[in-house]
Image: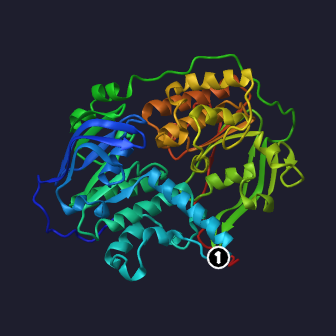
Amino acid sequence: MNFPPARQKGPAPGQPIFSMSGITLRVRDSWILTDTNWTVRTGENWAVIGPNGAGKTTLMRAITGQVPVVTGKMRRHLPMASPDAVGYVSFEFEQRFVDLERARDEARCFANRTGDIRRGRDIVFPVRPEKKQPDRNIEPAIDALDIRHLLDREIRQLSSGELRRIFIARALLKTPSTDGKLLVLDEPFDGLDASRRRILGAALDTLMTQGIQIILVSHRVDEIPRKITRIIALKKGRVFGQGSRKSMLSSRHLTSLYGSAIGMIQAVPKQTAPVHASPHPVIDVRSATVRYGNTIVFKNLSWKVYPGEHWAISGPNGSGKTTLLRLVTGDHLQAYANEIYIFGRQRGTGESIWEIKRLFGVVSTELQRNYRKRIPALDVVRSGFFDSIGLYQTCTDTQRAIADDWINRLKLTGLMPRRYDLLSYGERKMVLIARAMVKSPAVLILDEPCQGLDPSNRRRVLAGVDHIAQTTDTQIVFVTHRPDEVPGCTTHWLTMPPPIRRDPTGG
C-alpha cells in the first residue's frame, strides 16, 4: 500500500504519548489490570499478546477512552493520544456496530423506510461527504485493501472478512488525515485470507515507516509486523511482562505465557450420532448460483458430501464460503432458488426449519453476533441440545453429563458461572464451540472456529474436532483461511473461486 508521504512535522522521538501509572480498569462490576504501569513513547510500535480473557481488548479500550480508570492515573501527553484521534479496529467494535445496524434495520422496517439501507461507504466515511478525507489518502487505501466494489454493497451482505477490511480502511483513513498518528488494531489479520494478510502487513510496515505509530493485539506472534519492536504481555488480568521484541517473544517466555503444548484429548466412549443408511450424499448442491446485484458470489457451483467424509473449505474473502454453508442449513434466502438435497431430500419439499437444524451443529461468526443473551455460559452450552438462542427447556441428566464432559475437555469450567455476554471474544467463541459439540449432530459445521483464539485454545479446538471425527459418526465441515488450522481428520478439500464482480452475460 503506497500512502502519500506522511507529514514530517511532529514531536521528537522518545516523548511520552500516553502513560498509565498504577491504573486499575473497571468493566461493569469487575476490576481488571490492577496496578498497571505502561508508557508508550514517540517512535515506538507495540504488540500486545496474551491468552484469551487476559484483558488485551480492555487495555485497548482504555487507550481509546471507552473503559473507565478507577485508580491510578492515565495521562495523554500528546494530541495523537486523544480518543478522537486514535484509529481503532476490534471484533467488539464491529459487534457493537452490527448490533446498532440491526436495531436500525428494525426501525427502518417499522417506519417503512426499507430503501434507506447503510452501505460499506457509510462505515469508511462516517462523516458528511463534504468533510471526508482528501482523495490523496482515500484512493491508495481503497485500492490496496480491494474494497472499492464493497462501498456500495449493503452492510448485511458483506462477509466477515469483507467487513473487517472495511473497518480497517476506516481506521487507516482516519489516522493519516488527522493530527493524531496512533493506530490501535485488535486482531486485524483474523478473518482475512492469505493474500490480504500480506497486503495488510505491508501496509502496516509502510505506515510505521512514515511515522504513524501502531499498537497491535495479536494471538499469532508470527504475524506481528517486523517494525514492531516492543511487546507487552497480559495474563489473567495482569501485566505479565513488557520489553523488547527479542526477549518477549523467546520460546521460554511464550511457554510461560501460554503454557506447554496441549496433546490430544483423551478418548471417551463413542457417542451416538444419527445414522442415515442411504445411497444418497449427505449434502448435494447442484449448480448453485448466488448473486447480490451485479456481484456473483459463485455460479454453477456443485458440491457433494458422502457419508464418512470430512471436508475443509477455503477461498478468498467474499468467495461465498459462509454463503454456501447457509444455503445448506437453510439460513440463506436464496437456498430455495437453488437445487439442494440434504440426506436425499430436496430442500423446499415441505421440511420444517427445525428438521433441518436438528441435523446440523453450527459455529460461526454470525451465530456469535446473534447470540447476545445475558445468561450464564453454562446455559449457552446446554442450549446446543435444543438449537435455541437461550435455554428454555430442562436438560436431562444424560444431557447435563455430556455438556459437563465437553466443558471439562475444553477446559472451560471456570467460565461456566460467568455471564456469557461479559466474556471476551475468544472466551465466547470457546463456549459456542462447546455448545455445538454437545449435540453430536449428523454434520458439524465450523466456520472459522479458531478466529480470535490464542494458541492453546486453537490446539484444544482442533484436538476436539479430531476427537469427534474419530469417536462419533458426526461429519465435519471446517472453514478456514489458514492451512495450519485444518483438522487432521480432513479427507476432502473444497477451494472456492474468487467472486465474479460483473455478470459477463449482462444479466
Decide: is 382 above or below 7. above
Q: Amino acid at mark 1?
A: Arg
- The residue depicted at 54 percent of the width and 32 percent of the height is 461
Image-based side of 207 in relation to 290, left or right:
left
Residue 170 in which image quadrant: bottom left
Pick the quarter of the image with the C terminus. Answer: bottom right
Tell me where residue 93 appears, x and y as whole percent. 45, 55
Which of 324 and 240 lies nearest the eye of the viewer? Answer: 240
Image-based side of 314 in relation to 2, left or right:
right
Which of 45 and 321 lies nearest the eye of the viewer? Answer: 45
Decide: is 58 above or below 17. above
Q: How is the image coloured?
A: rainbow
- The residue depicted at 80 percent of the width and 59 percent of the height is 336
Residue 223 in view, yes or no: no
Which of 312 and 458 lies nearest the eye of the viewer? Answer: 458
Pick the quarter of the image with the N terminus. Answer: bottom left
Tell me where residue 65 appears, x and y as whole percent. 32, 54
Image-based side of 48 in relation to 113, left or right:
left
Q: Mark 1 sits on what residue?
A: 113
Image-based side of 458 in relation to 133, left or right:
right
Tell me where residue 488 appears, x and y as whole percent. 58, 30
Tell me where residue 202 appears, x and y as whole percent. 33, 57
Q: Secondary structure at mark 1?
A: loop
Residue 141 in view, yes or no: yes
Residue 275 in which image quadrant: top right
Residue sitting farthest toward the right: 350
Residue sitting farthest toward the bottom: 130
- The residue depicted at 43 percent of the width and 64 percent of the height is 145
Classify mark 1: residues with Cα within 10 Å, few (<14), some (14-19) or many (20+).
few
